Image (cartoon, rainbow, N blue to C red):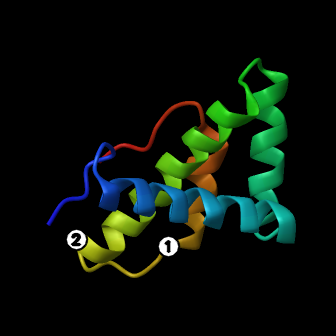
Amino acid sequence: MINKADTEGGQILGGAIIEAIEKQLADNDPSEAKRTLKRLMRDGESRENAIRYMSCVLTDEMFRVVKNNEPYNHKRYINNLKKLPQLPDE
């Protein structure tokens, strides 16, 4: 089942992903999360939009784990954060 953003399930899932990003920022773990947020905002993105970009990267990594049965790849996650605002390739 796919949770679309405009459904209740999609809203809950999106909120959980944003909460995970906020936790990474608060814990400074990974430290690249905070650096990415600062860089995107310095480059003109609003905080809200920067968090959305970061959420796309986390969602991509989660999708790979669940859909493709791949192990979580921390290096890929960090590299994708560094590439923002370019979104991850599929």
User: Where is residue 1, by image quadrant?
Assistant: bottom left
Towards the viewer: 42 or 15: 15
Local packing at callout 1 (Cα closer than 10 Å; few below 14, some 14-19, many 20+) is few
Q: Amino acid at mark 2?
A: Lys
Q: Residue at x 29, y 75 (%)?
A: 66
Distance Cα–Cα, label 1 vs label 2: 14 Å
Percent position of residue 71, x then y: 40, 82
Neighbor class of circle 2 (other Cα within 10 Å; few <14, some 14-19, many 20+) is few
Q: Nearer the viewer, residue 56 or 76?
A: 56
Query: Residue 79's x, y, as percent?
Result: 60, 53
Q: Which residue is mark 1?
A: 73
Q: How many marks?
A: 2
Q: Is residue 29 left or right of residue 10?
A: right
Residue drawn at the location 71% of the way across and 23% of the way down = 45
**Vertically, is 80 above or below 30?**
above
Q: Earlier in the sequence, mark 1 or mark 2?
A: 2
Identify which residue is drawn at 50% across, 73% down: 73
Position in image of residue 31 (x %, y %): 82, 62
Vertical relation: 61 (above or below) 66: above
Location of residue 29 by image quarter = bottom right
Asked whether the viewer can see residue 76, the reply is no
Residue at 66% across / 44% down in the picture?
A: 82
Mark 2 falls on what kind of element?
Answer: helix
Whether residue 54 appears in this view of the structure is: yes
Q: Which mark is residue 67?
A: 2
